[in-house]
Image (tube, coloured by chain):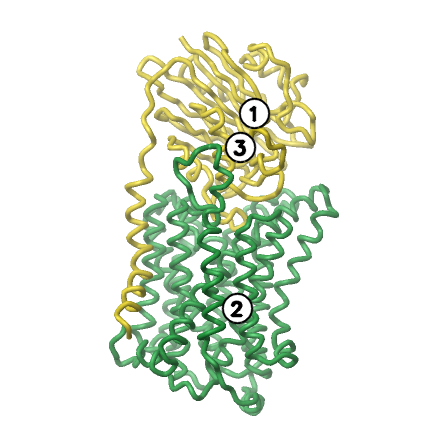
Amino acid sequence: MDKKFKCVLIALIISPLILSVVTIGIGEFPKEVAPKNELTFMTYNIHFGQGIDDLLNLERIAQNILIDDPDIIGLQEVGVGSAYLQGVDMAFWLAKRLMMNYYYYNPINNHHELGNAILSKYPIVLSEGYEIPSILMERTFIHCVVEVSSSLILDVFCTHIGIRTENKSAQVDFLLEKITEIATTSRQVLMGDFNLRDDTSEIGRVLTYFNDTAAEFGVDPQPSIDYIFNTGIDYIFATGYQDITDSHVITDMLPGINSPIEYGSDHLPVVSTIVFS
Amino acid sequence: MEKKSDLEFSFDEIESSLQSKPFYTLFFNLVILSLFFIQALRVFLPGVYVALSHVVFYENIAENLPILLTLVFFVLPALTNTICKKFGIKRVLVASIYVIAICRLLIALHLPNIFQTIFSGITVSVYGMFISTFLTVWIKDEKIDINSSNKIIFVIFSIMCAFLLDYLIRTIGFSQDISLLPPGLSAEFWYVTQYVWLFIQIPLTIICIYFTRLYFPRFTISPDVDDKNDQDKKSTRYSLIFVGVGAFWFLLFNIFLYPNIIAHYTSTNYYVNNILSIVALIAFILIIFRVKRQTLSNIKTVAILNGVMIVSLCLFLFLGRILTYIAAILVFVSMIIMYLNFYLLFVQMSTINFKWEKVKTISNAFAIGLVFYILFTVLHIFTINWAFIISAFKGLGPIIVLLASVLLVASTIISIHLNPRRE
């Protein structure tokens, strides 16, 4: 047998192994970011990485996120490794791609369903996932304590409330009770896809605990998923902050192009910039 | 690998029998076409899944039904024999190589979902035609002076090399092979970066077609007359092999090909599982080179190994999060046995005669295997994402996986047991 062919064969067999070892070193380190008081938050239902053109493309999601380069992100509909997602662990993939820390949680009995994730440029010092009482699909919310600096520690929550015949009222009540029970600081941010209009009684109850950052900034509710509600159902709520300096929905991913290829999901990313004292 | 062991397998033997250029062309084509098949199967499912979601939730039904119809492609390999009778087996073989190479190129263009799903479906089904026609001429060509066992090892080795290449690509792309990860590229050009694979795909397709035209071995086979006389009376019972192949595809493409999901089930590190998965594949390759087929297909050995696999899978599926790294290692062991089962099924499929001609035997195995793969995958989806539709299915995912594993084990053991020429 030709020596060159022998070398090719050995390379073919060994190189995946070598590369799999090398990537451990490459992939493990989130970039370090200087502490600051003004933080950009994003909530984004990524629809398992499938855009409105139905194509699966996580790089597109990453680029949609990078438009505002948020410090802390709440993601909903995050999948892990199933065949119809090409076997990708989406939270892990996006965290490595964006060089961020992350925490992912989905219902234990239902390995792929409707997982949520929080990605943070700052260390996540405590993380926990909870199941929300559900009738149809198992819903969850996650809690992360993010240490921006020794003097600025935040409680960040991310959730995805049920749809249609689900008892959303009970889910919101459970969420608020649990937050009251587990919060470690007075600085709290609650993000997620609530599947609720801003004029519903459930959102009204959330507003007894938190402020809607978009309303506080003074912008009208903007659609974050237009084909069902033509209104916003993705929110960033906060309490214990000093000021809101920005709040918007990212609607234009590729300037000058108006095409389905722009959108990585059927939802749009919602962004708020919050100043903490 | 190269030196002659008691197995008497040698690449030199194959190379000298085929001549250099045809040998390299054959190896390259087998590896690359198998890689295209793996990638296409992975692309196909998300396309069908999202279309099925739309139909289930009554969204754009008219647009999405044609995508669902692409599932028919998976039955097409069963027509290989009919097509071969009309056009000739060698023509079908060469044409299938061209079709796969071109369709994979079209997938890399990132076309709309419907086209992407159609082209990936065609790639998968035509690969079924390719492998059944190729195996037939490869095994039957008596002018090629290689024993049948070594012929099969060569084919299995090539397919496993494709799986290794797939692992390599996914490792680079953090497990998403089609859109290779482009770190740090400028935001303005991000849309272009998803075409990185296209720049690799274009030369691969050209080389594949060019080499096939010039150097692909010119097989000579005698008319298919002996098979029917030689067929085993129990041939229909061998049909179980087809189910085993389907169960293997399901287990591999739903769980075991993805270190991510093993890491998730066992609360362990992705990188460790990625390394273990690659080591399992390499270990399997070394086993088929180093251990005699008689030993591997000994019914007692197979039964013991499969017993170990079932116990390991039970521990992984039901106690994975408690056993963590122990469960990950058990998966590693199970994967080696799973590959061995596939190898043994492949040997049975290639060497025994069914009531049909050999092309039909292999193409039917491929088609029925794919149908079983789809059935199990859909069943699995109903136990997870769509469990709310039929609540009785909720949480039954591990049971479905276990059922597929039992089918794989049963089909391997029974097919060996029934083979009158078993070693």
Q: Nearer the viewer, mark 1 or mark 3?
A: 1
Q: Amino acid at mark 2?
A: Ile
Q: Give the alpha-carbon distance from disc 1 to disc 2, as whole Å.
A: 45 Å
Residue that mark 1 sits on: A250
Q: Is residue A241 above or below residue B163?
A: above
Q: Farthest residue in the right direction? A: B62
Q: Give the alpha-carbon distance from disc 1 to disc 3, as whole Å.
A: 16 Å
Are tags 1 and 2 found on a single chain?
A: no
Q: Is residue A37 above or below residue A80?
A: above
- Circle 2 — which element? helix
Q: Are marks 3 and 2 in contact (CB under 8 Å)?
A: no
Q: Which chain did the renderer colour yellow?
A: A
Residue under the image location 61 percent in, 74 percent down: B80
Residue that mark 3 sits on: A76
- Circle 3 — which element? strand
Q: Is residue A217 above or below residue B287?
A: above
Protein chain holding label 2: B
Are tags 3 and 2 found on a single chain?
A: no
How many C-alpha atoms fall within 10 Å of the one at disc 2: few (<14), some, or many (≥20)? many
Decide which of B211, B175 is in the foreground and name it.
Answer: B211
Residue B298: x percent and y percent? 37, 77
Protein chain holding label 3: A
Decide which of B169, B348 is in the foreground and name it.
Answer: B169
Q: Which chain did the renderer colour green?
A: B
